[in-house]
Image (spheres, grey):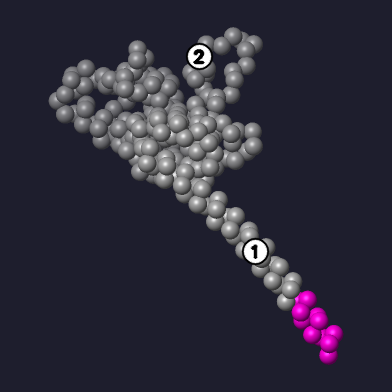
Amino acid sequence: MSSGHSSSFLAQLLASREFSDLTFFCCGQEFKVHKVIVCMQSAPIKAAVQGGFEETETNRINMDKFQPDTVRRLVQFMYSGNYDDPGDSDDDHGTLCADSIPSAPSVEAMLLGHIGVNSIGDYYQVDGLMSLANSKIKKLLSDRNANNHESLIAGLPAAIEAAAESTGNKELFEILAEAASRNTSCLLLDTEVLKNLSAMSDFAVSLLQAMINRNLALGTELVDTRFRLCQAEERLQERERTLRNAE
């Protein structure tokens, strides 16, 4: 069976809910799944249904610590190997009138959605889901389109805070740190925002500000040095011309 046919079959199986033998419960919503599919991809879920715990008897796993859309994306990944980006599904927009046009999600909302997926992947040890979420986050952060770059910068502090509170995934922290390092000057325009992050201290913010100021000073010094070198080169060329004319 080809991978494409297999994915299509699993998607149909999920949609039909037939033969489901396990339920993920989240904030009043139920997600019917199949143990043979989900337990193969998550050791914690497998342990919960086989370890003689409450879940073994009820065939029900409570996931209230996550948002329903996040759980839906976990299930979607387990059956298809991918998941909808935040804002791509009807669930993200709620109930809409037939002639209404949903507004595009903000960069911050998209970042937080992907970080939520990373978090649930980290919690249930679904490594492929974490990697996929990280690749989507990295792509989003690398998009320097002028139309969304400003909102990207504005959304970074909230993304950093969410990651610090919800996941221990080192790769995600490195992606966010790299994005922050590219935009440190912009982030430091409002130091109070950074100071309010649990991952930051007053000293860390002051250190970053000092580093930025030092880099600006070095940049000014470099420009001045280049100017003086150009002047010296011009004087040297003028002196050589004078010597040649004297001969």
The residue where tag 2 is placed is 94
Residue neighbourhood size for the residue with mark 2, other residues' Cα within 10 Å, grouped as few (<14), some (14–19), many (≥20): few
Mark closest to the chain's N terminus, 2 or 1: 2
**Above/below status of 65 relative to 167:** above
Q: Is residue 172 above or below residue 166?
A: below
Residue extending farthest to the left is 52
Q: In the visual, does 167 lie left or right of 187?
A: left
Which label lies toward us, 2 or 1? Answer: 1
Which residue is located at x 62 percent, y 12 percent? Answer: 100
Amino acid of disc 1 = Arg
Amino acid type of the residue tagged 2 in the rendering: Gly
Whole-angstrom CA distance, mark 2 to mark 1, is 59 Å
**Where does the image place residue 137, in percent across and percent down from the top left?**
48, 37
Write down the region rendered in magenta. Answer: 237-247
SS at badge 1: helix
Q: How many marks?
A: 2
Q: Is residue 176 visible?
A: yes
Secondary structure mostly seen in the magenta stretch:
helix
Q: Nearest the camera: 81 or 15?
A: 81
Depicted 64 relative to depicted 120: above or below: above
Q: For this rendering, which residue is in front, 181 or 13? A: 181
Q: Is residue 50 magenta?
A: no
**In the foreground, 130 or 20:** 130
Where is residue 5 drawn, in percent x and y? 47, 35
Rendering coords of residue 13 (x, y %): 40, 24
Quadrant in the rendering for residue 33: top left
Label 1 sits on residue: 226
Q: Residues within 10 Å of mark 1 (few under 14, many from 20)?
A: few
Q: Residue at x 59, y 34 (%)?
A: 150
